[in-house]
Image: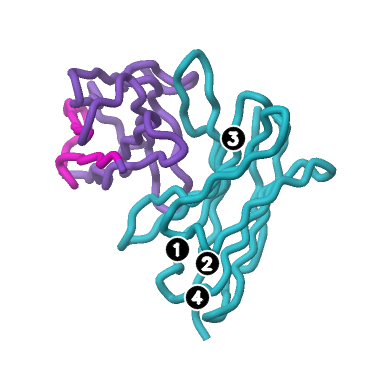
């Protein structure tokens, strides 16, 4: 059974960097059939995909246009986890952040599992 | 981006009722449509993948279907543990997966 365990601070000051980590158990961050994603949820924006990292003979990243200039997602194969960094945060970045695996099988894909979620508040 | 429009945004129902939730895609997405259940304070949980395939462990009272760009989630007999918010999600336009706005199922 695959599980994702998130860690990181719940309060970040405006203009600073939001940093979260997602530890994977039961699968590998280097899996050839999964991508490792960050998704956030807020009342104003709903569920919003932020970006992903994945391995297909080499490492790739994709980011949402809305955050592309501020986001970095990195894998860590030694610890089997991946991380999110979002720079220059504003109160609009206040949300519950989830890490999630997207599995691709037989021409389709779905999100399973999700991390437990981290409420990140941007406030001074 | 592909827009996913869910309706209704909320509904009130009683235990034992049949409940239907609809999701419409702004363009063709094939069967790349998944449904999730989210309870307060919890992460979403996969119910249905590939438009109509029931995730392992999900009760058989949940079912789903598709017709073109319209997708439907049905709960045949609502149980107390089913009161939650339900989301559709398209996986056609990766990596930019997008979600519907959610349907909150409340107790009448």
**In the figure, B52 relative to A90: above or below?**
above
Is the Cβ of the residue at disc 2 closer than 8 Å to that at disc 4?
yes
Is the Cβ of the residue at disc 1 closer than 8 Å to that at disc 2?
yes
The residue beneath circle 3 is A35
* Magenta-drawn stretch contains B13: yes
What residue sits 77% from the left and 41% below the top? A80
How far apart are the alpha carbons under marks 2 and 4?
Answer: 7 Å
Query: Is B84 placed left or right of A41 in the picture?
Result: left
The residue beneath circle 1 is A95
Give the magenta range.
Answer: B2-25
Element assignment for label 2: strand
Chain letter for mark 2, please: A
**In the figure, B31 relative to A19: above or below?**
above
Is the Cβ of the residue at disc 1 closer than 8 Å to that at disc 4?
no
Q: If you read the primary sequence from the N terminus, does the residue marked by circle 3 or circle 4 appear first?
A: 3
**In the figure, A34 relative to A106: above or below?**
below
Q: Determine the colour of chain B.
A: purple
Share a chain, discs 2 and 3?
A: yes
What residue sits 67% from the left and 28% below the top? A56
Q: If you read the primary sequence from the N terminus, does the residue marked by circle 1 or circle 2 appear first?
A: 1
Q: Which image quadrant for residue B78?
A: top left
Q: Position of residue B60 (x, y in %)?
A: 35, 16
Q: Which image quadrant for residue A12?
A: bottom right
How far apart are the alpha carbons under marks 1 and 2?
Answer: 6 Å
Chain letter for mark 3, please: A
Element assignment for label 4: strand
Chain letter for mark 4, please: A
How far apart are the alpha carbons under marks 3 and 4?
Answer: 28 Å
User: What chain is the cyan one?
Assistant: A
The residue beneath circle 4 is A122
């Amino acid at each position: 059974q695959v599980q994702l365990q998130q860690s990181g601070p719940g309060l970040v000051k405006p203009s600073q960097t939001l940093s979260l980590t997602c530890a994977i158990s039961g699968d590998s961050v280097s899996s050839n059939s999964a991508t490792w994603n960050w998704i956030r949820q807020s009342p104003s924006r709903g569920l919003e995909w932020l970006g992903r990292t994945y391995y297909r003979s080499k490492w790739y990243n994709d980011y949402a246009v809305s955050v592309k200039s501020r986001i970095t997602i990195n894998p860590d194969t030694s610890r089997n986890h991946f991380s999110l960094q979002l720079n220059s945060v504003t109160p609009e970045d206040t949300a519950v952040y989830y890490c999630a695996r997207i599995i691709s099988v037989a021409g389709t894909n779905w999100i399973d599992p999700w991390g437990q979620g981290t409420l990140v508040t941007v406030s001074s | 981006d592909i827009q996913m429009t869910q309706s209704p945004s909320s509904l009130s129902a009683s235990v034992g009722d049949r409940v239907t939730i609809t999701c419409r895609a702004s363009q063709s997405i094939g069967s790349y449509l998944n449904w999730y259940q989210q309870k307060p304070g919890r992460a979403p949980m996969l119910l249905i993948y590939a438009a109509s395939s029931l995730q392992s462990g999900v009760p058989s009272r949940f079912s789903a279907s598709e017709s073109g760009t319209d997708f439907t989630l049905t709960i045949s007999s609502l149980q107390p543990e089913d009161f939650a918010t339900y989301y559709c999600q398209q996986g056609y336009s990766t990596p930019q997966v997008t979600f519907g706005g959610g349907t909150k199922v409340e107790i009448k």
